């Protein structure tokens, strides 16, 4: 199965990072993918940038989410993850070249 817009990811706190979020406030969340950036927005080797919305208990859409999601939380078989090469990875400030 390949990752597609509309897929719902069941994310544990260790599966995602969110800019500006206090690590102590992280909790499990359900995210419906609303946008898959070109080249999956690779951030660092095992992390990809995805855009989505939180799925609330009632099934309604919650807030918009811009997350770095660890590839272990994604469906297996996404070709972009297998084909990604280091030149697709954008270096992060202060982390040096990859």
Image (spheres, helix red, strand yellow):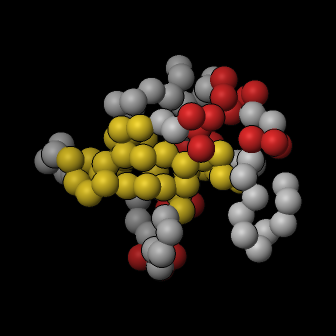
Task: Using residue 53 as the reference point, say whether residue 41 is left or right of it.
Answer: right
Q: Position of residue 16 (x, y in %)?
A: 53, 57
Task: Using residue 64 as the reference point, say whether residue 49 is left or right of it.
Answer: right
Task: Using residue 51 as the reference point, say whether residue 62 is left or right of it.
Answer: left
Q: Is residue 8 visible?
A: no
Q: Is residue 40 visible?
A: yes
Q: Position of residue 94 (x, y in %)?
A: 77, 74
* 82 lies above or below 15: above
Q: Position of residue 78 (x, y in %)?
A: 61, 26
Question: In percent of the image, x 74 and y 29: which residue is there?
Answer: 82
Question: In percent of the image, x 41 and y 38: which residue is there?
Answer: 35
Q: Residue furthest right?
A: 97
Question: In percent of the image, x 46 and y 51: which residue is there?
Answer: 11
Say which quadrant the C terminus sits in.
Answer: bottom right
Task: Using residue 61 as the reference point, say whether residue 74 is left or right of it.
Answer: right
Q: Foreground: 20 or 13?
A: 20
Q: Position of residue 13 (x, y in %)?
A: 50, 62
Question: In percent of the image, x 41 and y 65: which residue is there?
Answer: 27
């Amino acid at each position: 199965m390949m990752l597609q817009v509309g897929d719902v990811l069941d994310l544990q706190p260790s599966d995602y990072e969110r800019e500006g979020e206090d690590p102590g406030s992280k909790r499990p969340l359900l995210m419906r993918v609303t946008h898959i950036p070109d080249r999956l927005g690779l951030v660092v080797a095992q992390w990809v940038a995805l855009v989505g919305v939180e799925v609330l208990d009632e099934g309604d859409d919650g807030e918009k989410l811009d997350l770095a999601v660890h590839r272990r939380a994604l469906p297996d078989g996404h070709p972009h993850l297998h084909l990604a090469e280091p030149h697709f990875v954008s270096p992060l400030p202060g982390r040096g070249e990859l």
